[in-house]
Amino acid sequence: MVFYAKIGTQTLQIQAEDNTSAQAFLDLLAEGDITVQMQDYGSFEKVGSLGTTLPTNDTQITTQPGDVILYQGNQITIYYDTNTWNFTQLGKVQDLTQQQLKEILGDGNVTVTFSLK
């Protein structure tokens, strides 16, 4: 299953993970698009509040550029660099290099709309 993240004029295709957290996120998207205001954090991710809490499936992982992560059950992140922590992976951005991803996400705050289409 895939979902999408629209950032400006760019749309990222994201392959969903096979876990209950990703399924809960897909179910939420089935009700309508979710727009999240995301900020830079730690020079390796954009993070923003989902406005709701989803079930977590945290494991100790090292993120890679393009990983879409659920943090603390209520925040969504898009990684453009690596970090190691207890996270729940929701999906992985497809077919973009780290540099392309950084360019699309840009500097500072960004508005991201997640959808099923």
Image (spheres, helix red, strand yellow):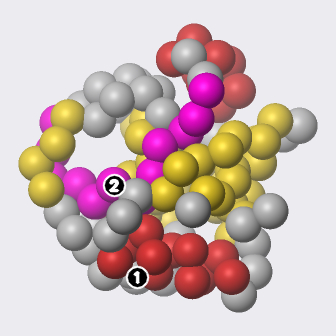
Tell which of 51 and 30 is nearer to you: 30
Relative to 35, say whether 92 is above or below: above
The residue type indicated by label 1 comes to Thr
In the image, taking residue 57 as reference, residue 45 lies left or right, namely: right
Q: Amino acid at mark 2?
A: Gln
Q: Is residue 19 left or right of residue 93?
A: left
Residue at image mark 2: 89
Reading the image, the residue beneath label 1 is: 53
User: Helix, strand, or loop for circle 1?
Assistant: loop
* Furthest residue in direction bottom, as rendered: 31
Say which residue appears at 29% left-offset and 35% top-offset. 63
Residue 66 lies, with reference to residue 30, above or below; the image says above
- Residue 69 locus on image (x, y percent): 38, 53
Which quarter of the figure has residue 106? top right
Q: Quadrant of the C terminus?
A: bottom right
Magenta stretch: helix, strand or loop mostly? strand
Residue 85 visible somewhere in the drawing? yes
The furthest residue to the top: 99
User: What is the CA distance from the residue labelled 2 to the residue labelled 1?
Assistant: 15 Å
Crowd tier of the residue under label 2, counting other residues whose Cα lies within 10 Å: few below 14, some 14–19, many 20 or above: many
Q: Is residue 91 magenta?
A: yes
Tell me if mark 1 has few (under 14), some (14-19) or many (20+) residues whose alpha carbon lies within 10 angstroms of its own. Answer: some
The residue at the far left in this view is 60
